[in-house]
Image (tube, rainbow, N blue to C red):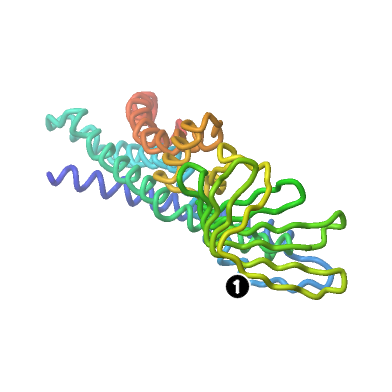
Amino acid sequence: MPLLYRYLLGLFWGTLLRIMGAFSGLFLLLDGAEQMRRASGPGRVIPWGDLMLMLFLRLPDFLIRLAAPMAMLAALITLAQLGRRQELTAARAGGVSLTNLLTPFLLGAGMLGVIQWGAYQFVMPHAHRVSDKIEDRVIRGRPVTDQAPGEFWSWDEGRVIHARRVERKGQELVGVAFYRLDEGFRLREVNEGARAEAESGGWRLREGVSRHYAEDGTARLERFESRFVKSSLAPRTVRDPAPAPEHMSYVQLWEYIERMAREGLGALSHRMALHRRIAEPAATMAAVLLAFPFALRLQRLGGVGVSL
């Protein structure tokens, strides 16, 4: 890499990191105060460790979402410094083209875009899941239900149906359990099976156990090789419930949207989340492209720093 590129790229990233540090401090201060307010209350002890962990898990999402405006601000400030020291004038007088001046900034924006992509693919889904769990436990005072991709829950005619996995396009449930409740929502019967296959009017459970609960609380256990459970749950309505879009990576979002499309179901929020994640790295480079001519024009009007 030419010396000029390394010099300008170092200036750009140094300014960008200082801006990120300033924004991070502002976020931790303001969001920390808000979360402390929400976690405090009569007789409640603030769990400082969990609160700090939640803030630091939320910080990457804040920085990634503001990557484009921070990159634009970093480019403007860097060009302002170069102009104040007359380095832009010296470079232009020495025959350095605008393309050579712009290329290091685009390289820096491209590197930031790659970081954005990697964060959305590998970091953000896990960070969101953990921070949401902490928020539910510390702020809302209730445990979060983290339903993994592939897990299935449904309600059908007084029964709660759960399966660890859905196979054969909804024709088969793996690790299935049917919980029958009475009118008072008391548990009366549980039918569990290693597998359940769809049949007309219900599901055929294989290799399972049945538990019957009497009014006095006693339970009767019965094992079976095959048992038919009547249900209106049709295979076409069985699908894997998905987590929130922010809990999913690029690949998980893409696979979920394709599956919903094959089944004729909508996934607008997930589709919008995927398009936004694709657009944000490109928006970072576009922000730098916008800042460059803007800064050069302001340089002729009295300097970028004065204009800012």
Tell whether 100 sits left or right of 76: left
For label 1, the crowd category at 10 Å Cα-Cα, with few meaning under 14, some 14 to 19 and many 20 or more, is few
In front of the other: 27 or 92: 27
Name the spot of residue 161 as percent of width and height, x first: 65, 53
Q: Which residue is painted at 19% across and 47% down in the image?
A: 6
287 w.r.t. 1: above or below: above
Tell whether 84 sits left or right of 50: left
In front of the other: 245 or 200: 200
Q: Which residue is painted at 30% across and 36% down in the image?
A: 83
Q: Which residue is painted at 66% across and 57% down in the image?
A: 178
Name the spot of residue 73 as percent of width and height, x first: 42, 39
Q: Which residue is painted at 58% across and 52% down in the image?
A: 204
In front of the other: 232 or 128: 232
Task: Let me know if residue 58 appears in the view.
Answer: no
176 w.r.t. 223: above or below: above
Please give the residue where the numbered disc 1 appears in the rendered image: 49
**How many numbered markers are drawn?**
1
177 w.r.t. 255: above or below: below
Name the spot of residue 112 as percent of width and height, x first: 34, 45
Name the spot of residue 64 as percent of width and height, x first: 45, 46
Task: Let me know if residue 186 appears in the view.
Answer: yes
Name the residue type under label 1.
Answer: Gly
Asked which quadrant contains residue 278, the reply is: top left
In front of the other: 300 or 134: 134
**Secondary structure beneath disc 1?**
helix
